[in-house]
């Protein structure tokens, strides 16, 4: 039997010192199928059964076949058994020590078979070198595991994750409109220019359309004609109605007038009344035409729809404009209140704090912080960027901020439930998987995880670990799954 080495890195440290190689190179040397390995001033140990080694001073040669199977008992003792005829070394075996660890005592038995070559010391002053040789042999044979390592561990913690992400944003006007000419005409006068601050209802552009004035005059004249005709019809109605009444009175004396004359007089009264009604209807239509013409002529004056700033001007006096041209006259933007559009990543869009105050900075005012209020989100993701364009309302006092600026937003984020957190060094990433090494009852277990958000000096993980689990603080795939380790905190 061979007692367990309490420090699994001892052999690797020794190889680094004697060979002057890196840690990874030392591990490769111990695992490689080399025919021999020189232990500095210590004994030479060979894995090649055909090698012939001369004993050094203080050492005695033993011939044996080191064909070993291995197992680890609960007491930490490694048992090695041979696959051939056994020879036993007991009692006369020397005590081997390395890094203050007893490797082989006089009362232990090392079972070996015929064929291989190894050395042991018979002098007390050579014990350390021989211990190094034995450990090097175990490393070459792949028998030195990490189960004897002392590892630093930490407990998995959990808390509701809150953080502020730095996200880019963009300012847009709260309202913006391009003003077009509703009717065709020539630009007579432009009252404003780019940068002008305007109020709702303020006159901005005056157009000229002489033909529209002529059409209005014609419609108004038609109303006058119809009203004259109506007066004439009303006078005629009075005449025929008087005639009818006289005939009706005379018809009371039999034979004075013919019955047909009374009927004709009555019909004449009805015709006069109908003419008046017709003229009244025509006059109403004419007045409506006049009103419509006046409304069209009102479009010759372009007014501001809301308080804002003129940001573009395309119209100049003398230019022909109208619906057929398609060219806008001016652009008005409301900048006293802005929309701050923030593209929130999909991973942080599940808990948008509506109504929350969000701080942001702009390059134009270094060292100054502004704030906006979360107002609107579209409840849909941009298919190209996988982000949600959330809008904040920003009161722009003094018009210091302008549309088109790109602020940096301190976007607040809070997980809806507690997150599992570990140190980032605890996560081991290989080409095949990411995992942490959980330690339970001194045994290691590789648990697959995936990374989440960073939280200070910790990182969020998703997987099979939970709050209170013990994991290796500095994970490495050198710590094999199922190994026995000594825990330190």
Image (cartoon, rainbow, N blue to C red):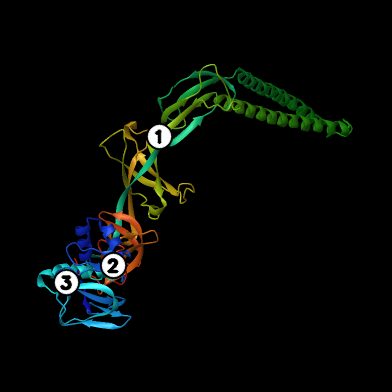
Q: Which residue is mark 2?
A: 140
Question: Which label lies toward us, 1 or 2?
Answer: 2
**Can residue 95 be spotted in the picture?**
yes
Q: In front: 196, or 467?
A: 467
Q: Which residue is mark 1?
A: 404
Q: Is residue 309 left or right of residue 422?
A: right
Q: Residue at x 45, y 47 (%)?
A: 385
Q: For mark 3, does the 10 Å Cα neighbourhood hold few (<14), some (14 to 19), or many (20 or more) residues? A: some
Q: For mark 1, does the 10 Å Cα neighbourhood hold few (<14), some (14 to 19), or many (20 or more) residues? A: few
**Can residue 100 be spotted in the picture?**
no
From the top left corner, tell me how far across and down residue 484 is, in percent: 26, 72
Question: Which label lies toward us, 2 or 3?
Answer: 3
Q: Secondary structure at mark 1?
A: loop
Seen in the picture, residue 171 relative to 207 is either above or below; the reply is below
Image quarter (top left, top right, bottom left or bottom right) of the N terminus: bottom left
Seen in the picture, residue 379 relative to 253 is either above or below; the reply is below
Q: Residue at x 22, y 61 (%)?
A: 15
Seen in the picture, residue 16 relative to 50 is either above or below; the reply is above
Q: Secondary structure at mark 3?
A: strand
Residue 140 picture quarter:
bottom left
What is the distance, in whole Å, between disc 1 and disc 2 at their CAs? 67 Å
């Amino acid at each position: 039997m061979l007692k367990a080495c309490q420090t699994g890195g001892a052999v690797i440290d020794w190889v680094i010192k004697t060979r002057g190689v890196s840690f990874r190179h030392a591990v490769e040397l111990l695992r490689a199928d080399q025919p021999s390995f020189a232990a500095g001033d210590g004994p030479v140990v060979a894995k090649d059964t055909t090698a012939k080694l001369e004993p050094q001073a203080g050492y005695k040669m033993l011939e044996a076949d080191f064909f070993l199977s291995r197992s680890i008992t609960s007491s930490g003792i490694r048992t090695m058994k041979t696959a051939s005829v056994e020879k036993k070394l007991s009692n006369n075996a020397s005590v081997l020590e390395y890094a203050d660890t007893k490797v082989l005592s006089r009362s232990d038995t090392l079972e070996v078979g015929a064929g291989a070559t190894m050395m042991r010391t018979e002098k007390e002053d050579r014990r350390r070198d021989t211990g190094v040789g034995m450990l090097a042999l175990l490393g070459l044979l792949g028998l030195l595991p990490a189960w004897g390592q002392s590892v630093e561990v930490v407990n998995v913690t959990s808390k509701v994750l809150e953080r502020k992400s730095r996200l880019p944003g963009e300012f847009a006007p709260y309202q913006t409109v391009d003003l077009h000419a509703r009717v065709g005409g020539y630009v007579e006068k432009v009252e404003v220019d780019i940068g002008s601050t305007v109020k709702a209802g303020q006159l901005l552009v005056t157009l000229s359309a002489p033909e529209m004035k002529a059409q209005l005059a014609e419609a108004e004249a038609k109303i006058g004609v119809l009203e004259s005709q109506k007066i004439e019809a009303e006078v005629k109605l009075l005449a025929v109605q008087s005639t009818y009444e006289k005939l009706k009175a005379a018809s009371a004396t039999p034979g004075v007038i013919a019955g047909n004359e009374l009927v004709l007089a009555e019909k004449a009264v009805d015709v006069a009344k109908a003419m008046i009604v017709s003229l009244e209807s025509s006059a109403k239509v004419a007045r409506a035409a006049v009103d419509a013409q006046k409304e069209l002529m009102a479009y010759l004056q372009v007014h501001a729809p809301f308080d804002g700033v003129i940001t573009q001007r395309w119209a100049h006096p003398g230019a022909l404009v109208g619906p057929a041209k398609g060219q806008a006259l001016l652009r008005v933007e409301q900048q006293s209140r802005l929309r701050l559009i923030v593209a929130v990543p999909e991973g942080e869009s599940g808990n948008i704090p509506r109504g929350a105050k969000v701080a942001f900075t702009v390059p134009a005012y270094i060292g100054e912080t502004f704030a906006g209020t979360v107002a609107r989100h579209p409840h849909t993701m941009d298919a190209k960027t996988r982000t949600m364009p959330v809008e904040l309302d920003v009161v722009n006092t003094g018009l210091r901020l302008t549309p088109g600026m790109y602020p940096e937003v301190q976007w607040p984020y809070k997980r809806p439930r507690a997150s599992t957190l570990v140190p980032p060094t605890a996560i081991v990433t290989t080409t095949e998987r990411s995992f942490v090494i959980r330690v339970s009852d001194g045994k290691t277990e590789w648990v697959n995880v995936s990374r989440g958000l960073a939280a200070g000096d910790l990182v969020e993980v998703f997987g099979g670990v939970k709050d209170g689990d013990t994991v290796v603080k500095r994970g490495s795939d050198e710590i094999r799954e199922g190994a026995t380790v000594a825990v330190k905190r």
